[in-house]
Amino acid sequence: MCGIVGYTGGRQAAPVVLDGLAKLEYRGYDSAGVAVSDGDGNIDIKKAKGKLKILFDLTDGGKSFNGTCGIGHTRWATHGEPSQNNAHPHCNDEHTIVAVHNGIIENYSQLKDKLTRRGYTFYSDTDTEVATKLVDYYYKKHGEPLKAISEFALHARGSYALAVLFKDFPGEIFAIRKDSPMVIGVTDGGALLASDVPAILKYTRNVYYTDNHEIVLLSKDGVAFYNLDREEISKTPTLISWDAEAAEKGGWEHFMLKEIHEQPEVVRNTVNYFLHDGKLDLSELQLSEDYLKGVSSITITGCGSAYHVGVVGQYVIEDIARIPVRVEIASEFRYRKPVLGGNELVIVISQSGETADSLAALREMKQQGVKTLAIVNVLGSSIAREADGVFYTKAGPEISVATTKAYSAQLIAMYLIALKLAEVRGTVGAQQYSSFKRELTELPEKIAKVLETKSEVQKFASQMMDKKDVFFIGRGVDYAVSIESSLKLKEISYVHSEAYAAGELKHGTISLIENGTLVFGTLTQKALAEKTVSNLVETASRGAYVAVLASQSVEGIPENFKKVFHIPDTDEHFTASLAVVVMQLFAYYLSVLRGNDVDKPRNLAKSVTVE
Ligand code: M6R
């Protein structure tokens, strides 16, 4: 995820900005840049591909930059490859307006066309250059920065934290945000902005959290906030009491909890990046629509949670695109001699893009001449480099060993691929297709709703502290949720658990059910819910403590079940995105209660690069 920093005040700006960017390195980036305006308003820009150190060396730690007002950026590529040209800051042709941006402008291609018709030329592939020139256009029209920024907000769709320098207003930074984070700090004789608190903590502990569509004006006299009508609004700062390490976690107790809460943003970013202006654009994947039309079968492979995403994908792709799909554990697949279909597509899923077994499976398939597509989070990772096509999820760096937000972004990748296949093969009607797209864009809000139930989950976890064995059961997509829930619980709470296809339990495993054994059923598939309820009743009558997680409109849940969690209704293909959040929280709270090292569970590594 990109990071932005800005400073104006009595000090030389570039060292402060570079220092702030260094504190945001944990967000991940592939290039960086800084712009500083000197006393006369002349704006100097330096940017470089690669690590911040290159920029440090280029500018002597920022000292070679003259000026006390500056903005900086670390870029995690979304539109356009990582390169110096695509790195921020971007500027207008006259170098009088310079901007950095974090987020995704969804309608950037429409805006680019409009601006091109009005005589603008573009030199990078980025949506940020479009944003900068949009501000430039309105500034030239109205001659007023606040008006230009509010017009930008009225015309740009998507998410952004945007900071702009105007040559005509030396010493001032204008900024605005929507759905991308931006905090503001005030110091003695200056002001700062950043994507996250750690970047400014060294200079101030008084922080303003900006809301969507608030415009901020930073100057050496402090900060002023405005609404889109350019009326000044008053805000109260928050005093940050965390230390630097806690600040990196954004005040959350653990990275896992932070990452769980980032899921609405991550899902929004991934959906909006590929689905905009009503169109699903997967051209970046390098798989032509003609090719996708002719795919005869699909194999999805991965390890751990990535494999579990594949299981969801199998249900969803088969159901809506009517293509045979199999899912294989990468460590098995790589050593099998699978019979591959004529026009088979192999999809490898991996957050890190470095998992040894997944990489080996990919290489094996490539050697056999099969077309491969990687779903990867880490830019430029081995799997991303070696696959024929790449779907980059927009989860940002994931630090906690237990995956949460990357898993959620991978689910979105599966849904979007399923939808594209259905579109090119004509397997769903227009109305159904629109409804799928609508449901996808509503998922972030619904995930946020599920997060609101966290204290209920926490209380439940505290009541389940003494459980030694837990069984998760479900059918269809609910089975896929169950295997992920079980892994999450084992991984961080060290409580033994198993996941079973609900109908399979009675073929042996039911003998493990004793008085008080926790059996957690997932019920989001209406047509299958009744069957799973029967299986849960079978366990209850053998003494199980039955809890269920059900979509709001699922009926027929027996009253003697001990606990019922509800999640909002959504299209049944996408329910894993909501159900998993409750299970992540359950595993998290149980782990905390048991005093475990949540982010670094025993015996595990974030990226498993050995066989
Ligand atoms: O980086 P990858 O997605 O390839 O990692 C695969 C698994 O190692 C990973 O999902 C693992 O199961 C997680 N720790 C689960 O939370």
Image (tube, rainbow, N blue to C red):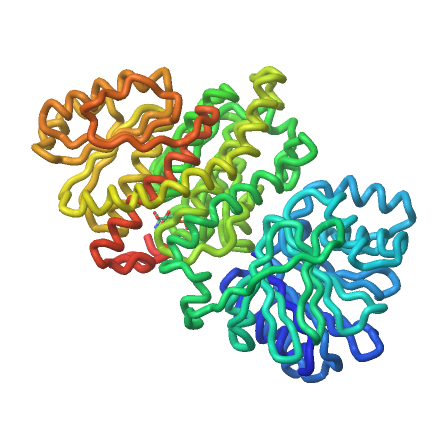
In the rendered image, which quarter contains the N terminus?
Answer: bottom right
**In this view, 33 is above or below 118:** below
Identify which residue, 272 or 389, lies in the foreground.
272
Task: Please name the residue shown 47% across and 41% down the image.
Answer: 448
Count of numbered marks: 0
Task: Answer yes or no: is residue 54 visible.
Answer: no
**In this view, 184 is above or below 290:** below
When asked about the image quadrant of residue 536, the answer is top left
**In this view, 589 is above or below 526:** below
Q: Position of residue 147 (x, y in %)?
A: 80, 54
Task: Answer yes or no: is residue 526 visible.
Answer: yes
Identify which residue, 587 or 88, lies in the foreground.
587
Q: Is residue 512 left or right of residue 587?
A: left
Task: Please name the residue shown 51% across and 35% down the image.
Answer: 443
Pick out the residue farthest to the right. 119
Q: Is residue 518 left or right of residue 198?
A: left
Task: Please name the residue shown 69% across and 60% down the image.
Answer: 175
Q: Position of residue 263 (x, y in %)?
A: 47, 45
Q: Position of residue 553 (x, y in %)?
A: 39, 21
Task: Please name the residue shown 87% across and 46% down the image.
Answer: 116
Q: Is residue 350 left or right of residue 119?
A: left
**In this view, 577 is above or below 209:** above
Identify which residue, 229 or 348, lies in the foreground.
229
Q: Position of residue 101 (x, y in %)?
A: 67, 57
When asked about the image quadrant of residue 480, the answer is top left
Identify which residue, 414 or 340, lies in the foreground.
414
